[in-house]
Image (cartoon, rainbow, N blue to C red):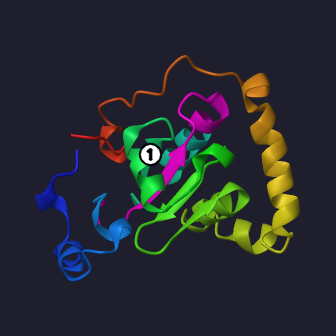
Amino acid sequence: MLQPEDLSCRHQILCAQFPLIPYLCIMPVELGKKIILFDGVCNLCNGAVQWVIKRDRADVFRFAPLQSAIAEDLLKERRVDTSQLDSIIFIDPGMAYFIKSDAALEIARNIKGYAWAPALLGWIPRSIRDGIYDLIAKNRYRLFGKKEQCMVPNEELNSKFLQTS
């Protein structure tokens, strides 16, 4: 679990200088880490997370299921209406967040060897990309199955998952 002393000096200074910017300070994440929020009971989503973890050699990503309190707080901080959203969400703390196909492309951009994906697929209009994304998302439980509860990371992967204290 991330402890305050694990945070970079830069993050602590930013929080002191900009206390009114909640997305920089409420949810501390190690400097340079990016967050992927995913449907924790979806087999397709869990498979995608495992795929990213396997390729995250630079240890860039941290994960949290959408069903967790941390995800709820992160989304609330960004004023994301979760009632209209059934998507993977990629958060670059202090910068921006991305949903649906944009999230997938941003995740690929941050995995060594996959930067070609956004360059190749990014020219496709978002409405088309998100339409395909929505079709898969709408049918993901039927096609790939659903777990009864969110994935519990093993001890080796535990540090990659955001948790409440």
- In the foreground, 74 or 160: 74
Q: Residue, x 55% and y 62% (percent of image)?
A: 111
Q: Is residue 78 left or right of residue 143?
A: left
Q: Is residue 131 left or right of residue 36?
A: right
Name the image quarter holding the N terminus: top left
**Residue 43 counted in the magenta span:** yes
Q: Residue, x 49% and y 35% (percent of image)?
A: 67
In the image, residue 52 sits, relative to residue 124, either above or below, namely above
- Badge 1 amino acid: Glu
**Residue 39 counted in the magenta span:** yes
In the image, residue 154 sits, relative to residue 102, either above or below, namely above
Q: List the residue tagged with mark 1.
A: 72
Is residue 44 visible to us here? yes
Q: Residues within 10 Å of mark 1 (few under 14, many from 20)?
A: some
Q: Residue, x 80% and y 40% (percent of image)?
A: 136
- Chain part drawn in magenta: 29-47
